[in-house]
Image: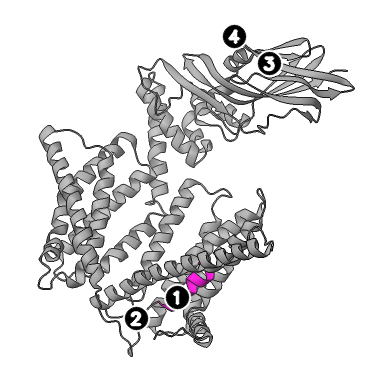
Amino acid sequence: MAKFPSLQSVLNATLKTVLRFPLETITTIFGTICAILLIQKDYGDTSKEFLFKAIMSCSLCLVLFLSISLFFFNYKKNNLLRFLTSSILGSLAIAFVFSFKNDASEIEMQQYLVLNIALHLLVSFAGFLPKKYNQEEFWEFNKQLFLRILTSGLYTIVLYSGLALAILAVKELFKIEFDNNIYGYLFFVIAGIFNTLFFLNGVPDTNNHEIPLKLSYPNGLKNFTQYVLLPLISLYLVILICYETKILITLSLPVGWVSNLVLVFAIFGILSFLLVHPIATETGNLWMRTFNRWFYFSLIPLLGLLFYAILYRVQLYGFTHERYYVLLLAIWLVIVAGYFLIQKQPQIKFIPISMCIAGLLSIVGPQSADSISKNSQLSRFEWYMQKIEKEKLNFEQEKDLSSIVDFIEENYSANILIPYTKDKLTTLLKKDEEPNSSQIMEALGLTYRYKSNRKNNINTSFYYSYYDDENQNIENIHDYDFSCFVSDNNNLDCENCIEIDKIKYSIKSFEKPYGCNLEINQDIIPLRIFDFVNTTKAFDYNNSDKKITQTIELPKYRILITYLNINGAKKENKKTITNYRLKVMIGIKK
């Protein structure tokens, strides 16, 4: 008969885990507190940025501290050195996160993700660095670690779901009101503290002579790998080999998407290789043995296809962070394949170690993804700046330069372009510290081309949007008397809808070839929207963060128009508007 663990045994297990991993426990508690405080903050609260970075730091430090603990458990040195090492490296991780901008950029989040993956890989082999390597122990350790992650996740989901449902039942049955954020508090406590402590409690001891790590291969894993994973990998291999044969026969260029397919095949193939490695040589596992023997040979032609596809695009368009990581993975796969083909007794720990090193090298330094991508695109930008001094760029060249400017504007700042432009951007940057790509291209005397533009397309679409309060109500406005919303598909018709100084006002709108007419009682006010849009260059830049307004002064009224949405077609320099939405504020002159 199954016995439930007593409260005392649960407390003892928890205490044992806390004493074994004290820094990890403190980190996860602090991260959970920060997460709880974060959901209490209102939108726009500046402290949210600090709390978010604190949570990111805790996520990195938790995995880093675990790796250091596993290393020192086998290094057999006192805890003082372990805590000192954790403090130094943890401080570097925290400094790395807090060096991010307040609103972290896509590149910074990419660096954070890569570092997080590298530190997770470090956990897999950190405990085996200071001791004599045993292949079976290494495989068993990572198997138990992986199963513990799955078990922790399952327990967390069930526990949270059960307690959340219990809170809901109490609320509905007994009419007890809880804090609106109670479900968020509950989630972070369980996912943060319970899940982490439960996982840490099951981390295998790699230096326990009484209970050593012994290989135990689950039969379910064998069946899954043999009858599901390997057939899928074989299917991908057949597709890729057929496609490569087609390229050789037709002498056509490989499509860019094939790089992703090769990487998926290679990574899942390596995963399958690791999963079947302990039993691949056993009698009766012919398919697994064949796969283990020939997998890396099958990678050779596919890696050739991968290198050709990615290097061809790098040659045409230079490096971006995505192309950098595709090439880095291709180089890593060559190194791994070469190691397992050349070494007579290869060690599977080479796979996570080499991938961890590759990830760390890609984050900082002159060889990093950010450094190489930025220098590559700046070099291409400089080449175009030298070219436009000699000749006019054609459509495709302007389109390519526009994509370079997009990359730099999105990821860095227009200021880094100044040394290459001979003061062409100086005036623009004095007016606007963060100009968009269209403004930069215009300042260079060029036309911005969208990625979707085609040379033979005569008409190109344009759009402008600015977020504002979109309520349809007529209301009193400070400095103005009332406001209304006007759009092309919804004429305004409001009889006696507002009273000011004992005078009732009716407001109507009618579409006209130049925009619309606004009728206030018997007064007709023409709103020449189309002329304003065509004479205002700000509409060329598709901004959603820059407010465009138009002021109209009349004998009886003062009008302020805020443009919320404008879109249509553009032919040469002429815009044809198909849809618009405006906020009109009206002041009555005394």
Residue occupied by mark 1: 200
Q: Residues within 10 Å of mark 4 (few under 14, many from 20)?
A: few
Q: Amino acid at mark 3?
A: Ser
**Figure quadrant of the C terminus:** top right
**Is-magenta flag for residue 193?**
yes
Helix, strand or loop at mark 1: helix
One can see residue 31 in this view:
no
Q: Quadrant of residue 35?
A: bottom right
User: Residue 460 at what x, y percent from top left?
Assistant: 44, 19
In 3D space, how far apart are the residues under numbered discs 4 and 1 (Cα atoms)? 71 Å
Nearer the observer: mark 4 or 2; the answer is 4
Nearer the observer: mark 4 or 3; the answer is 3
Helix, strand or loop at mark 2: loop
Residue occupied by mark 3: 509
Q: Amino acid at mark 1?
A: Leu
Stretch of the chain drawn in magenta: 191-202
Q: Say which label, 3 or 2, has the lower sequence index.
A: 2
**Figure quadrant of the N terminus:** bottom left
Nearer the observer: mark 3 or 2; the answer is 3
Residue occupied by mark 2: 206
User: Residue 340 at what x, y percent from top left?
Assistant: 18, 63
Q: Amino acid at mark 4?
A: Pro
In 3D space, how far apart are the residues under numbered discs 2 and 1 (Cα atoms)? 14 Å
Q: Say which label, 1 or 3, has the lower sequence index.
A: 1
Q: Which secondary structure class fits the magenta region best?
A: helix
Nearer the observer: mark 2 or 1; the answer is 1
Q: Residue at x 12, y 63 (%)?
A: 287
In 3D space, how far apart are the residues under numbered discs 4 and 2 (Cα atoms)? 80 Å
In 3D space, how far apart are the residues under numbered discs 4 and 3 (Cα atoms)? 13 Å
